[in-house]
Amino acid sequence: MLTSTLRSLERDGLVSRHVTVSVPVRTDYELTPRGRSLLLVIFEMKEWAEDHMDDVAASRLEFDRHRLAVG
């Protein structure tokens, strides 16, 4: 799954892949300029998730509780 995701990101131009011929073969990935342009958005999403983690957990519990009651 990880390999598939990395290949998709490479195809989209978000990461570049560098293979070093050695034993074993080494493959390194790095963000491209396009990938780096997403960092601010990703960090803001991470901050939002951390700020709302307790509220989301409470919503999940309430949702599950309601579903169990309704059957």
Image (tube, helix red, strand yellow):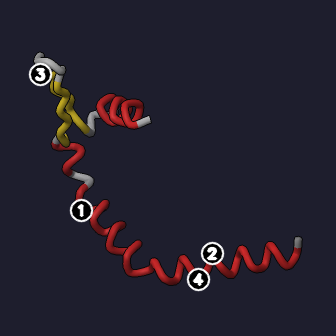
22 lies left or right of 4: left
Residue at 35% over, 29% down = 7
Query: Are the residues tagged 1 and 4 within 8 Å (C-beta)?
Result: no
Secondary structure state at the residue bearing disc 4: helix
Spatial distance from mark 1 to mark 2, Cα to Cα? 28 Å
Residue at 27% over, 39% down = 14
**Residue tagged by mark 2?**
60
Spatial distance from mark 2 to mark 4, Cα to Cα? 5 Å
**Residue tagged by mark 3?**
20
**Residue tagged by mark 1?**
40
Please tell me whether residue 27 is drawn above or below residue 46 in the rendered image. above
Secondary structure state at the residue bearing disc 2: helix
Please tell me whether residue 47 is drawn above or below residue 16 in the rendered image. below
44 lies left or right of 55: left
User: Which mark sits nearer the N-terminus, 3 or 4?
Assistant: 3
Identify the amino acid type marked 2.
Answer: Arg
Please tell me whether residue 44 is drawn above or below residue 52 in the rendered image. above
Q: Nearer the viewer, mark 3 or mark 1?
A: 3
